[in-house]
Structure formats: C-alpha cells, structure tokens
C-alpha cells in the first residue's frame, strides 16, 4: 500500500488516497510515506507538511455566551439598577451573536468588572476563544 495525495494550486492537500502498490500514478499524484501524517487542508510543499490552521472563533451564539456566565453573575446583571448594565442587557438582547473580540463587547464586560459583577479572572474565562459547539 502507498499513500498518494493531490494538491490544489496553492499546495493545499485536497485528496488523500491509500492505494495498492500496483496503482498507476496520475501526473498530479504525489506519493507520501505511509508513516508520514498528512491531513486534508494541510500545506504540502517539497516534502514538508504543515497542518491546517483552525480558524479562530470569536463569534458565539447568545445562548453560548449566557452559559459562560454563572447563575450569580446573571442574577447580578438582571437585578442591577445601573443604567449602563441595563444598556448592555438591551444590546445583548438585540444581537444575533456575541463577538468576543468586538471592542464594544469588551468595553461592556470591562464595565461589569468595574461594577464588581465579574472578576478579572472571570472576564478572561468569559472572553476565551469560542468552540465549534458555541457557534
């Protein structure tokens, strides 16, 4: 058995095949050692493989964002009489997602830290990169 890959014009792997030793190679086939790890979307250039870079997820659903907050934090936000906190709640309610890198979101969360609703440590946790499950 041999491992054969095909690349697009940017040297990104778009096909991986494991074939019999008697396979007739096509002109754009590249044989790769069986013990060499390669994956679709990776870069393959002159025998060197570079894994694909996972895109950063900064936009998460409103539900996912709310699940990042503790019950105590949600209650503190909901019962706050601070007009700035109320505007933050309204902004969240009128959004279809939360962008964890958006300056206004970070400013609002920073205000929650100043207001002692969130701690600095919790701010770091709440604004960590999203996951595929949170989109």
Image: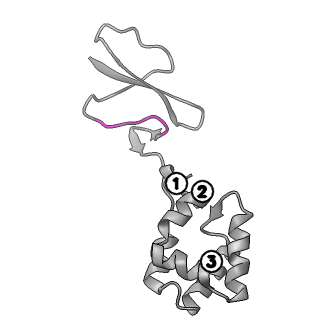
CB contact under 8 Å: marks 1 and 3: no
Nearest the eye: 95 or 123: 95
- Per the image, the residue denoted by label 3 is 106
Nearest the eye: 110 or 7: 110
Question: Quarter of the image containing the N terminus?
Answer: top left
Label located before the other in sequence (2 or 3): 2
**Residue 41: x %, y % from top left:** 49, 38
Q: Is residue 96 above or below residue 115?
A: above
- Per the image, the residue denoted by label 1 is 134
Q: Secondary structure at mark 3?
A: helix
Q: Nearer the viewer, mark 1 or mark 3?
A: 1
Q: Which mark is residue 61?
A: 2
The residue stretch that appears in magenta: 36-41
Q: Is residue 88 above or below residue 45?
A: below
CB contact under 8 Å: marks 2 and 1: yes
Q: Is 129 in the magenta?
A: no
**Residue 9: x %, y % from top left:** 60, 33
Q: Is residue 12 above or below residue 16?
A: below
On the picture, is 9 further left or further right than 22? right
Crowd around label 3: few <14 · some 14–19 · many ≥20 (10 Å): some
For residue 56, what is the image quadrant?
bottom right
- Label 1 to label 3: alpha-carbon separation: 18 Å
- Label 2 to label 3: alpha-carbon separation: 16 Å
């Amino acid at each position: 058995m041999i491992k054969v890959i095909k690349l697009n014009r940017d040297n990104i792997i778009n096909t991986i095949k494991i074939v019999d030793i008697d396979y007739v190679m096509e002109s754009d086939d590249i044989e790769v050692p069986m013990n060499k790890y390669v994956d679709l979307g990776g870069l393959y250039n002159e025998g060197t493989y570079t894994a694909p870079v996972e895109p950063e997820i900064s936009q998460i659903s409103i539900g996912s964002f709310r699940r990042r907050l503790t019950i105590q934090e949600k209650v503190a936000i909901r019962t706050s009489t601070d007009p700035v906190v109320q505007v933050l709640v309204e902004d969240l309610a009128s959004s279809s997602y939360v962008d964890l890198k958006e300056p206004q979101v970070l400013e609002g969360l920073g205000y929650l830290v100043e207001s002692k609703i969130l701690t600095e440590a919790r701010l770091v946790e709440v604004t960590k990169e999203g996951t595929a499950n949170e989109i």
